[in-house]
Image (cartoon, rainbow, N blue to C red):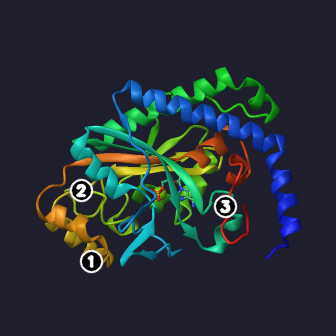
Amino acid sequence: MESIGRLSSRVLEHLSDPVVKSAVKVKSTILGEASSFLRGKNFVELLPTIVSPITDPLNHEVHTTRFTYYDQEYRLTQSMIFHKQLACKSFERIFIVSPNVRLETSEKALSGRHLFEFSQIDLEIRNAKREQIMSLIEDLIITVMLSVKRNCSEEMDFLSSDPSIPSKPFATVKFMDAYEQYGKDFETILSASFSEPFWLIDFPIWEREFYDLLSEDKRTLKDMDLILPHGFGETLSGGEREWEHQRILERMGFKGNDPEELSWYMDIAEGGELVPTAGCGIGVERLTRYVCSLDNVSRTRLFPKVPGQSWI
Ligand code: AMP
Ligand code: MG
C-alpha cells in the first residue's frame, strides 16, 4: 500500500493533469449529447440502482461485492440488466447512466480498458429486435461524435485527436467467421485493422450470460458487441433477452447459474410477467478513451479506480 502522503500527491497531480481535464470535458459532452439524443427518441431516464439483492452474474471472474444489511444480502450493481428488463414493464423505452462496480482481478490493471468502477449508458426497449438497437446506436455514436467535434475543438486539438465520423450502416462480422479466420485473438486483430467502428454479432451460446436470447439455431445468440477501430476494442455489449421462465431455467442450467441467487426475479419470470426486450450498454469511459485517443480509461475520470491499485 502506498503511504497517504504519496497517494494525496498522486491525486492532486491527476486532478490538475490537462489531459485528464480535457478528456473529462469531452466525456461530459458525450453524456449530455447521448442523453438529449435518447430523450428526443422518447426514452425515459431512470436513476441508477446501486445496491440490490440481485445483479448481473457476469461471464468472467470478479471479487464479490456482497454485504448483509438487516438480514438481507445485497450486492453492488455489476450491471442493471435485470432492472432494465423489469423497467420495460413500466416504460417502453428506458435509459440510465449506470455506475457499475466490478471488482476486476488485478491482471486487468494494465489493460488500459478496465476500471473497477465505471459507467454505462444503459438502454432497453420493450418488444425490440437487435437490429433496431444497432441502428439506434449507430445514429447515437455519429451524433455524439459530431457534437464533440463541434463543441470540444479546443480539447480535441490539445489531445491531438481527430477520429473520423463513421458512416451508417457499420460493418457487421459474425463471431464464428472471425474466430475461424483469425483464431482466438480475432477481436484484437480486427479492432487493430478496422478504421471505423464495427459490429460483432451471433456469439456462440457458451460465450455469454444466460439472459442473451438463443437463436432458432440453438447455437448462437441474438446479441452484438460494438468494437472500436485502431485497437481500442469493445465498447458496447447488448442483444435481445430471454424472458420466458422455462428457457431462462434451461440457460441457467447450461451456464451453472443458481436460480436462488436471483430470488424474486425468478418468481416474476415464473409468473409470466417478464416482457420481451432488447438493449445494450455503452462503456462511457471506453468510448471517451477512443474519442480522445487516450492510452488508458483512467484518464477519462477525475477519480479513477484501477483494478488492483489503491486509488481515490
Ligand atoms: P458488458 O455487458 O459486460 O460487456 O459491459 C458493457 C460495457 O461496459 C462494455 O462493452 C465496456 O465498454 C464496459 N465495461 C465493462 N467492464 C468494464 C470495466 N471493468 N472497466 C471499464 N469499462 C467496462
Ligand atoms: Mg461485453
Depth order, front residue of 151/231:
151
Across and down, in percent, residue 180 comes to: 45, 62
The answer for how far apart the CA atoms under marks 2 and 1 are is: 26 Å
Gap in angstroms between the C-alphas marked 1 and 3:
31 Å
Label 1: how many Cα within 10 Å (few below 14, some 14–19, many 20+):
few
Q: Residue at x 34, y 40 (%)?
A: 94
In the image, is 58 to the left or to the right of 214? right
Work out how far the residue at label 2 is from the one at label 3, CA to CA, in angstroms: 37 Å
Residue that label 3 marks:
305
Residue type, mark 3 in image: Lys
Residue 156 visible within the image: yes
Rendered-image quadrant of the C terminus: bottom right
Indicate the amino acid at tag 2: Ser
Name the residue carrying label 1. Answer: 260
Q: Kindly indicate the quadrant of the structure image that contains residue 308.
A: bottom right
Asked if residue 240 shows in the view, the reply is: no
* Of 224 and 29, the residue lying toward us: 29
Label whose residue precedes the other's in the sequence (2 or 1)? 2
Q: Quadrant of the N terminus?
A: bottom right
Residue at 27%, 54% in the rendered image:
241
* Few, some or many residues within 10 Å of mark 2 (<14, 14–19, 20+): some
Secondary structure beneath label 2: loop
The first of marks 2 and 3 along the sequence is: 2
Sequence-first disc among 1 and 3: 1
Label drawn at residue 215: 2
| Mark 3 Cα-neighbour bin, 10 Å: few <14, some 14–19, many ≥20 | many
Q: Is residue 109 left or right of residue 47?
A: right
Q: Percent x, y for residue 160? A: 79, 34
Mark 3 beta carbon near ligand 1 (under 8 Å): no
Pointers 2 and 1 in contact (C-beta within 8 Å) = no
Whole-percent x, y for residue 68 in the image:
43, 77
